[in-house]
Amino acid sequence: MIQIDSSLTPASLAPAIENLFAVSAPKIRALQTRWADKSGTPVFTVAGEYTARGWTEWTQGFQYGSAILQFEATHDEEFLAIGRQGTLEKMASHLTHIGVHDHGFNNVSTYGNLLRLQALGIIPAHEWEKNFYELALKTTGAIQAARWTPLPQDLGYIYSFNGPHSLFSDTVRSLRALAVSHLLGHRLMHEGDKPASLLERLLQHAETTARYNVYYGTGRDFYDQPNTRGRTVHESIFNLNDGNYRCPSTQQGYSPFSTWTRGLSWILTGYAEELEWLDVLDESGLEPFGGKNKWLDRFLEPAIATADFFIEHTPTDGIPYWDTGAPQLHRLGNYLDRPAEPDNAWEPVDSSAAAIAAQGYLRLGKFLINRGDKNRGDIYFSAGLTIARTLFAEPYLSLDPDHEGLLLHSIYHQPNGWDYVPPGKKIAQGESSQWGDYHLRELAILLRSLTPGSIYHRFFNGVAGH
């Protein structure tokens, strides 16, 4: 169980954040130089060097988004040029990619960050450049929403790359593409000029995910016990003939009845940031769907359940193992009563899950404090700071100048055996991923924005006046 340090503040982590971006700069520069003429997208490192992996092209936005965040933190124009040029030259295909559920990852991390920096006055707000970013964000939201499986009872979901039967937990975090597109006043148009509301599809997807991919200890199946409230499944499977739910499944977790911890983190942070987005919407726009309070309460339920589960099923320093049911965890003894051990002989940790979850805790905690639930909000906020403190230091922060990754001990696909096992070791360890590196930087940007006099970081800042 995470040992939450309530004495931490965002300001207390400022020196570590400054060091993080100092370490980050040469890594972005080295990857940009080495990867310039390569095809494909860097995904994760092998022996310290980024490599591609042909599954889906879902990480390029993190590559160029990281450079944009580096510029935001340091105002070094070199990184703005990398991020802006990479977005212009490499990201257009991701805007119109009809085969993936990852639009929020790729395009809000690039076009969205650039639009946000314009609104903050960090980069010049040239009108046509702004129009370009807004058009891109309108497009990505509609294309993502078109990948749609309708269900009975006004439900439905953006289906994963596995096909129309498949609902991934990851996609909750990618809903930010629909959220931004909706704020920009956009709709998806179908045959016969029939419009589809991006807001409605976002709400339906979020409801379907909350209902089927999150467990609340209510006996939905044999394993849905009170002591596992907040457990998540990577994938839900539906019968396309009648729209009925069939079973839990997983691609990257150990089993459908255990919790893949990165999927858990996507759920936690996805609902937390969407709560902030819902909170700024006009009540009138949500009235046709039951009103704002209905949806704030609905999004809070999975966010709180997963936040509690993560705390209870993670080692004391806030770094989880890759799956809560990983088959060899029992060999580690009372592993939840001590810090995570990335250099063990049995099961890998996943630092990227921690980097994603830390942001969710900070956002959820702040949201609850603002709503008057200070006790619970303080716990979550301090949990985010506790995890961040661990990630911003060794053995997770990569200080080796010859290693291209920033966040060490990230796991991609343990069941497929894709992660690198160093010579002499028994498990994957010591490697980085584009999503881990990006979310570590984004976590640092969020923490900087929580200091006095700063503008609080939200993915939709600068969109339609927000």
Image (tube, rainbow, N blue to C red):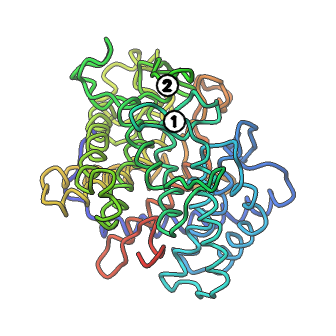
Task: Tell me if residue 106 comes above or below residue 341 in the rendering.
Answer: below
The image shows residue 129, relative to residue 299, as above or below, that is below
Please identify the quadrant where the C terminus is shown.
bottom left
Determine whether the residue tagged by mark 2 lies in a helix, strand or loop: loop
**Residue at label 2?**
243
Residue at x 32% of width, y 38% of height: 306
Q: Which residue is mark 1?
A: 150
Q: Secondary structure at mark 1?
A: strand
Residue at 59%, 64% in the rendered image: 138
Please state which amino acid type lies under the numbered disc 2: Gly
Q: Amino acid at mark 1?
A: Pro
- Callout 2 environment at 10 Å: few (<14), some (14 to 19), or many (20+)? some
Nearest the viewer among 231 and 171 is 171
Along the line of sight, the residue nearer the viewer: 122 or 270: 270
Residue lying at 66% horizontally and 81% vertically, measured from the top left:
129
Q: Nearer the viewer, residue 171 or 257?
A: 171
